[in-house]
Amino acid sequence: MAAALVAGQGAPQEALLAARWTARTAAPVFLVAYLASTLWRLWPGALTAALLKRRRQWGLGFALAHSIHLAALLVNIIAFRPRPAATLIGGGLAYALIYLMALTSNDASQRLLGRWWKWLHRIGIHYIWLIFTISYASRAVHADPAYHVEGRILAPLFLAALGLRLYARLGRR
Ligand code: HEM
């Protein structure tokens, strides 16, 4: 957000860059949480074991990072550029899942919810993955070529992350 305030020229551009860059910094934190168990399954070792052990903290770190995106995007859409209802509903549902997952990321909730906990977290993490992938895929083919670089690097990265998860779960069985 500080970088956006320095780089932007005028409040509308500062708000846009803040929304853009806060999502971009949250993306790698999400990918670590998304891939922690996959990396350990495929390459067991000290580093992957440490990532797996701290997966809950990576997930909570992502919830915090994406809360900063929420603050930035609220300024952007309320003050400068309202977004269509479909974006607000799709993104709003992702935020509902992020906070449900963050609130239940503790041993007591895990015990209380039993099998439902697994379903909530499995569906939630893939829905968030879907929103990231759609966001970057739409940038990859955006009418404005300025969006292409990040879309064409990060959409394949998110697809590869899903592929790796599927390979670790199904391929190696
Ligand atoms: C109602 C909810 C949301 C709104 C209104 C919103 C709004 C925005 C805005 C205004 C931008 C900057 C657009 C630009 O660069 O031109 C942005 C970027 C982005 N948002 Fe959100 N967002 C929402 C939720 C989410 C969620 C839940 C995710 C992921 C799970 C997400 C992922 C992204 C990504 C990947 C970018 C592009 C970052 C980049 O350029 O690297 N957003 N969003």
Image (tube, rainbow, N blue to C red):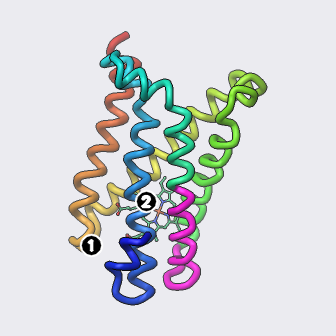
Q: Which amino acid does label 2 sit on?
A: Ala
Q: Residue 164 carries which label?
A: none
Q: In this view, does 15 lie above or below 33?
A: below
Report which quarter residue 38 is drawn in: top left
Q: Is the magenta stretch mostly helix, strand or loop?
A: helix
Determine which residue is flagged by label 1.
143
Report crowding for label 2: few under 14, some 14 to 19, many 20 or more residues within 10 A (C-alpha): many
Relative depth, front residue between 16 and 64: 64
Is 14 displayed left or right of 7 in the figure?
right
Q: Which of marks 2 and 1 is nearer the N terminus?
A: 2
Report which quarter residue 172 is drawn in: top left
Q: Does the magenta stretch include residue 75?
A: yes
Quarter placement of the C terminus: top left
Residue at image point 63% right, 30% down: 119
Report crowding for label 1: few under 14, some 14 to 19, many 20 or more residues within 10 A (C-alpha): few
- Give x and y (percent) for residue 166: 37, 26
Say which of marks 2 and 1 sits in front.
2
- Give x and y (percent) for residue 136: 34, 56
- Give x and y (percent) for residue 11: 44, 87
Relative depth, front residue between 104 and 53: 53
Q: Which range is magenta?
A: 66-83
Q: What residue type is labelled 1?
A: Ala
Relative depth, front residue between 13 and 151: 13
Residue at image point 36% right, 71% down: 3
- Give x and y (percent) for residue 4: 38, 74
Name the secondary structure under disc 1: loop
Relative depth, front residue between 160 and 66: 66
Which quarter of the frame holds ligand 1? Answer: bottom left
User: For the residue with label 2, is its CB less than 8 Å from the closest atom of ligand 1?
Assistant: yes
